[in-house]
Image: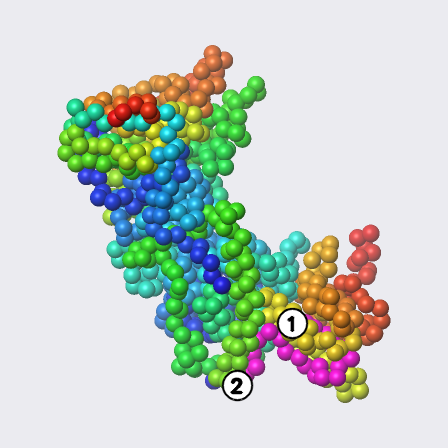
Amino acid sequence: MAEATATKAPKKHLFVPGHTACAGCGQAIAAMLVVDTAGPNTIITNNTGCLEVLSTRFPETAWEVPWIHSLFENAAAVASGVEAALKFLGKKEGINIIAQGGDGSTADIGLQALSGMFDRGHDILYVCYDNEAYMNTGVQRSGLTPFSTNTTTSPAGRQSLGNPLPKKNMVGIAAAHGIAYSASSSAGYPQDIKNKVKKALSKRGPKYLQIHVPCPLGWRHDPGQTMNVAKLAVETGLYPLIEYENGELVNVRKIKEVKPVTEYLKAQARFRHLLAPEAAEQVKLIQAIADENIRRLGLKA
Amino acid sequence: MLVPITSKPGSARANKTGAWRTGKKPRFIHKNCVACRMCATICPEGVVEGDVKNTFGCDYDYCKGCGLCAAMCPKQDIEMIAEGEKL
Amino acid sequence: MKEFVEGSMAIAKAVQSCKPGVISAYPITPQTHIVEELATMVADGHLNAQFVNVESEHSAASVVLGASATGVRTFTATSSQGLLYMAEVIFNIAGLRLPVVMACANRAISAPINIWNDHQDSMTVRDAGWIQMYAETNQEATDLILQAYRLAEDHDIMLPVMVCVDGYTLTHALEVVDFPTQEEVDRFLPAFDPIFKLDPKDPMTMGVLAEPSCYMETRYAIHRTMLDALEIIPRVAGEFKKMFGRDSGGLLKGYRLENADSAIIAMGSQVGAVCEVVDELRDAGQKVGALKLVTHRPFPYAAVYDALTHVKEVAVLEKAISLGAEGPLFSDVKAAFYGKGKAPKLSGFVIGLGGRDVTKDSIRKVYRLLAGKPVESEFIDLNVEALKANG
């Protein structure tokens, strides 16, 4: 309901057109919402990945705020250095520091630097754009790839039904550090993204926001369906939208009408192998994951 | 010696991604629009703009033709038409 | 003012006087005392800096990268495995043209694990685009820290600088060190004035994607800058000498090379022992000398050539080996004479790996071996029995 009400669009985007995101890219939608909500007094550190590559091919940049890319796994550490420098200069007040990256650079190779950032209590918001695989390098499996997903390094085949491993509970891992705020959002709910970015930035200390962003190319769906696919993930219970504060679960987005996982799976060709009758047992396992999320987090309205 | 290795803000605007469209573009019908701003909010290129009801449109120099605006308009007031068709 | 201090403390005091705003490091022997001293200074209010305790060397380097990019003077220190772990950040810092200063407490590389001194660690990143200078004494280490910030932040350089200090041999040795006053340091080292930085008032994008059409020029620019630094390094050393009266830093320094028939070229603390042997042999009537190399990167080919061209036999004595090839310093010195008409007979000796003591006996042996056939990377002082045990 909140999505249909009037929301004031920014007069000027801080993530401008001309970038080379694929048509319908969920990450582009989310990144624009994040930086627009944060405002011009923001410094961004960015891991290597889709967002970095599509937005900063020299000499063009889509960013209107100060922005730095260093390596694949260290945006959280670079941001820690930026924050320390601003503190030293006495200029930290009023400047938002956002470190961001994809699921691979956040939950896998960058987990150490992220944990260190949480541990040291830096006043930084970390945003993870979760498209559930290493998309920039060609759709390889990451720690946030869901169970049974077809990726190029966890392909479905005659002896495999895709990724055999569960999706890492990164929001929970962040929350377990006891940080001020750890939450999930979705490109299917732009107002939710704005609200959570604003809420995160109003708090002091480390914050974590994970945004589910469909990838038309990697998930194989029509570019115009990005938001509908994102909504289905939430409505099936496969991608809960939740908020932790200081390690405690404080809020969940209830699902009015829970949809069966099959509706989500058939909307994307990366799950095509699960539509075969032989895969019925596997689909039950995926339904069980959704059911367990709903039960454990109290998602039913 | 220091060759430029930093980029000026917003310089991506030089890249007119409208050339990417492969056959379809959005037509803003301007009949049932309620100015919910959903189209302006979710365009991945950020090129849909508007003010009050029935004033929304996009910059075709950058529109990649993804179709999100048409898919998400709650009033079905945006349709994807063939590239050659008049708006 | 003169004080009798451990090398690590001398380096920490030098860093303190340069007033960095952000210090970040991860513990590793034998660098630890340096950062512990700095942490104590911060805790006691003697140093106004943000001290960031990180969870790995990769992050330590990333923190100083981010802070330097925000326009603040920074410092980090590491050794051996830590330097290797942060290696990709090392290249990144140079590529981003950030004037970070680091102390590398030189230590051997695993496997097998060995915490004692040699130069293999700093040698492995010699291609990264950092200026690398090797201290002979704790006094020189102190002085090099000051010169490092001057060089790094020079608008004609804007490259990071690594001050290499022999682990344990220097870091844990006590020596009389003459420290400049804060007022003197402030005169020698102006405040950091970045050319570009992260600032919402003047946004820019750093760390761009450079396609084949523009990447190569960035590497050429760093290379060109390092070659230009060959003139700036001696100039800064000259200014330092004028202000503080000491001959620290610079590219290299000859010792009794005039009319020398043979010479050893070496870096770091072992130079002291080499010079003592030179004095001994000179007293015995032999025409020997030594060349202390301070700056290894950029490599001062012309200066090495000029210093040694009149010498008949030269031995490179180094604490590193490029496994499967030869000592890296040996390769560099040979290149200084390649294609030139007059060249000494050059021999390469690898000594002191894994902290094995460099003794005056070994150095005397090297001067004796110089008279024979040229030597291609011979290892000095190997334990022949141990080699037999390994078949």
**In the rendering, at what x and y percent does residue A27 appear?**
36, 36
* Contact? badges 1 and 2 (CB < 8 Å): no
Q: Amino acid at mark 2?
A: Gly
Drawn side of residue C30 relative to residue A134, left or right: right
Question: Label 2 marks which chain's residue?
Answer: C
Return the residue at label 1. Answer: C302
Pick out the residue farthest to the top: A277
Residue drawn at the location 27% of the way across and 53% of the way down? A41
Drawn side of residue A5 relative to residue C386, left or right: left
Q: Residue C253 appears in which quarter of the rendering?
A: bottom right
Neighbor class of circle 2 (other Cα within 10 Å; few <14, some 14-19, many 20+) is few
Return the residue at label 2. Answer: C245
Query: Height in image: C347 above or below A4?
Result: below
**In the rendering, at what x and y percent does residue C54 appear?**
45, 56
Query: Height in image: B42 above or below A232?
Result: below
Pick out the residue farthest to the left: B52
**In the rendering, at what x and y percent does residue C57 appear?**
50, 56
**In the rendering, at what x and y percent does residue A138 appear?**
50, 33
Question: Label 1 marks which chain's residue?
Answer: C
Say whether residue C360 is magenta. no
Report how far apart the C-alphas of labels 1 and 2 lie in the structure.
26 Å
Residue drawn at the location 53% of the way across and 71% of the way down? C8
Between B55 and A65, the one lying in front of the other is B55
Q: Residue C247 appears in which quarter of the rendering?
A: bottom right
Q: Amino acid at mark 1?
A: Ala
Drawn side of residue A15 relative to residue A139, left or right: left
Residue drawn at the location 20% of the way across and 32% of the way down? B56
State the SS at label 1.
helix
How many numbered marks have been drawn onto this rendered protein structure?
2
Residue drawn at the location 16% of the way across and 23% of the way down? B32
Which range is magenta?
C246-266
